[in-house]
Image (cartoon, rainbow, N blue to C red):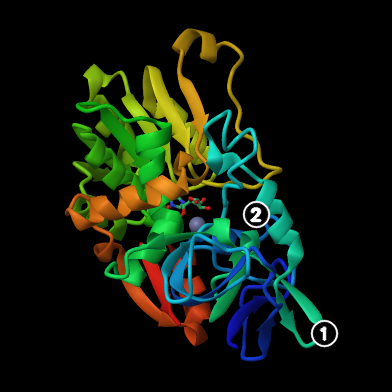
Amino acid sequence: MRAAVLRNVGDKTLDVCDDVDLIDPEPNDVVVDITHTGVCHSDLSVMNGTIPQTVPLILGHEGAGVVAEVGDAVTSVSPGDHVIAVWSPPCGTCVYCLRHKSPNLCVDLQFGIMLRRQFRQGDVEVASMCGVGTWAERTLVPEQAVVRIDASIPLDTAALVGCGVMTGVGAALNTAKVAPGSSVVVFGVGGVGVSAIQGARVAGAAEIVAVDRNLAKLAVARSFGATEAVLPEELDAAKAEVNDGQGFDYALECIGHPATMRAAFDAVRRGGTCCIVGVGRMEEQVSFSAFEFFFAEKNLVGSYYGGADVRVDFHRMLRLAETGRLDLAGMIDRRLRLEDINDGIEALQTGDVVRQIVEL
Ligand code: APR
Ligand code: ZN
């Protein structure tokens, strides 16, 4: 089958091959024909080493498709079912899944499937991003790594729910818990930032200010519900307009640079919440004075997969889309074929796109 393979960390392009195979499914596995998959910044972050993964590797972690085959022990899905892939599947039994009610933080399955390498190219074992690998016509994952959806739901927008939408909307609703009538600033207007803006709107925020260095993205932010959109150098003026100039109630950082993480923290008022959604490099640091946490009493919180229980929250996202409260279709601003994936990666680098969808 066709798949896009990353040979080395640091490579600027992927090899689109047509001789990739899957291993045979084990009893708990599901084989999925991927029909649509998004191009998320985290894919690029694997290519440039920000997110560590083993190579050779098949990228893609935001995808949807149709179940082709299931192992003997699989009970939750059958061939023909439509599903969204989950890049951090809950095992359902560990302390995070049960005691801490944080199934997004369960790594029992994820670490195992990342090491398994379900793809082959000739004699070479090929790994997959987070054990998912949706930039391939077909993938194989444990049944916990798919969520069944109604066959009437378009699979292109469903794919977006698998990462960007869940991450951004979930950060606003589940992690930051944006309150009605509050003020929110969102840093970065990519797929994740647009989702965070929409999440803040769903939560009933009174002011939603978007910040992006790409001028074209400011109009995009407004079209998804930002009440104001500014370049980074204009943020101080926008901040002066809310909460008597004290700062925003919430900041959602959807870029992943130390400087924007720090700027997000500085943008919130005393007692406000700064939620870091973006993924930076492990060796990079963000600094805080030892005094400011005491004095400003700000909350600094990370958000992983939008704090979601995917088994419940994917359906919540789809219901919000179905009832017109989230615009998922409008987020897709470019459609690609797998052969054009390198064009897609280039477009992502310039920050001009919200979400590109690869149709397989
Ligand atoms: N200041 C302001 N805006 C910036 C800056 C900056 N220093 N750097 C980048 N941006 C903007 C880009 O112009 C772009 O509009 O941030 C946006 C990022 O969008 P995408 O590249 O599409 O990223 P996305 O897929 O939304 O992911 C954002 O969330 O899940 C994580 O790993 C992901 O860290 C990444 C972040
Ligand atoms: Zn992603």
The picture quadrant where one finds residue 11 is: bottom right
Sequence-first tag of 2 and 1: 2
Name the kind of residue labelled 2 in the image: Ile
- At mark 2, the secondary structure is loop
State the image coordinates of residue 16 (x, y, percent, origin top left): 60, 85
State the image coordinates of residue 144 (x, y, percent, origin top left): 56, 56
Q: Check the image and name the residue furthest to the top.
A: 295
> Residue at image x 30%, y 57%?
217
Name the kind of residue labelled 1 in the image: Asp
Q: Which label was assigned to residue 123?
A: 1
> Residue at image x 17%, y 53%?
323
Q: Is residue 9 above or below residue 235?
A: below
State the image coordinates of residue 214 (x, y, percent, origin top left): 36, 56
Does mark 2 have its CB less than 8 Å from ligand 1? Answer: yes
Q: Is residue 25 above or below residue 239?
A: below
> Residue at image x 62%, y 91%?
18
Where the N terminus falls, by quadrant? bottom right
